[in-house]
Amino acid sequence: MVVTINIMQNRKAIDDVSFLLNSLHINYRNIEDYIKAFVHKSIVNERPDFIPEHNERLEFLWDAVLELVITDNLYRDFKEKNEGELTDIRSALVRWKNLALISRKLGLNNYLFLWKGEELWWWRDSDYLLANTLEAFIWALYMDLWIDDAKKFINTHIYTTLDDIIENKYFKDFKSLIQEYVQAEFDITPTYEVLLEEWPDHDKNFKVWVFIWEKQIWEWSWSSKKKAQEDAAKNAYETKDKWN
């Protein structure tokens, strides 16, 4: 007979996540949702007896909570800006790169539940995974303590990055910036091509190249085509003075 231990009854998981919540001054009521927020799909695929649901399953709700709070804040704080400007700033605030930085600063990577095999790779420090984890954590906070506490957390840890984003113009769309630059300098439009798809379907990695004419100017790999294109455009634009 095989004895299984569900993660929700795992004493170490409860103690670890409880320590995190206390350190963040969150007076939680039900710790189960918070534990679930740290469960990566790899462990569910390998051990469905351990826990039946991973944090990405909850994406539909967590995006809505985060964007609602950020949208409301921007609408009230920037009455002089139009819809397009507000949308760009909101996108920068909730962009996975920004969320990953916040997640890492809060130490959320230390609480992830991953399949043992994933530990051999870079997953625990993956920006994409850390961003998802932070969003899932916000979902858990919303489900446990409702909107006011979720809003307080978002305003304290995410909305406070706004000044840095505006100062450094991180709200700019780099695909648009590089297109404007290339069209102005060379009178052509850059193209993006997926040169390689690696790894199994549930865990894809796409290698994207940016081309001007037939010349490759930058390459980037990521877990979705869109994210790979965004990072390729950003790095290409930031190194444009070094193009040959």
Image (cartoon, rainbow, N blue to C red):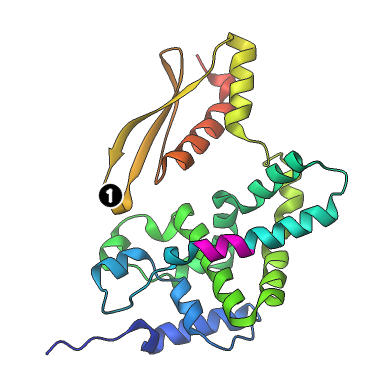
Q: Quadrant of the N terminus?
A: bottom left
Q: Splitting the image into 4 quarters, where does residue 102 fall?
A: bottom right
Q: Which of 191 and 244 is in front in this view?
A: 191
| Residue at the (60%, 84%) spot, across then down | 22
Residue 177 to residue 49: above or below: above
The reply to whether the magenta stretch includes residue 64 is yes
Q: Nearer the viewer, residue 201 or 40?
A: 201
* Image coordinates for residue 183, horizontal then vertical, percent: 60, 14
Side of 76 where 110 appears, left or right: left
Q: Please, what is the dominant secondary structure of the magenta stretch?
A: helix
Side of 69 where 231 appears, left or right: left
* Image coordinates for residue 137, horizontal then vertical, percent: 54, 70
Task: Inspect this view and state whether residue 134 appears.
Answer: no
Q: Is mark 1 on a helix, strand or loop?
A: helix
Q: Residue type at mark 1?
A: Asp
| Residue where numbered disc 1 is placed | 201
Q: Nearer the viewer, residue 80 or 196?
A: 80
| Residue at the (53%, 67%) spot, across then down | 107
Residue 122 to residue 7: above or below: above
* Image coordinates for residue 16, horizontal then vertical, percent: 47, 82
* Region in magenta: 60-65
* Image coordinates for residue 62, horizontal then vertical, percent: 56, 65
> In the rendered picture of this protein, how many numbered marks are placed on residues?
1
| Residue at the (33%, 75%) spot, across then down | 52
Q: Dot 1, how many residues are within 10 Å of its Cα: few (below 14), some (14-19), or many (20+)?
A: few
The reply to whether the magenta stretch includes residue 160 is no
Residue 83 to residue 239: above or below: below
Name the residue furthest top: 187
Side of 41 where 76 appears, left or right: right
Name the residue furthest left: 1
| Residue at the (64%, 21%) spot, across then down | 180
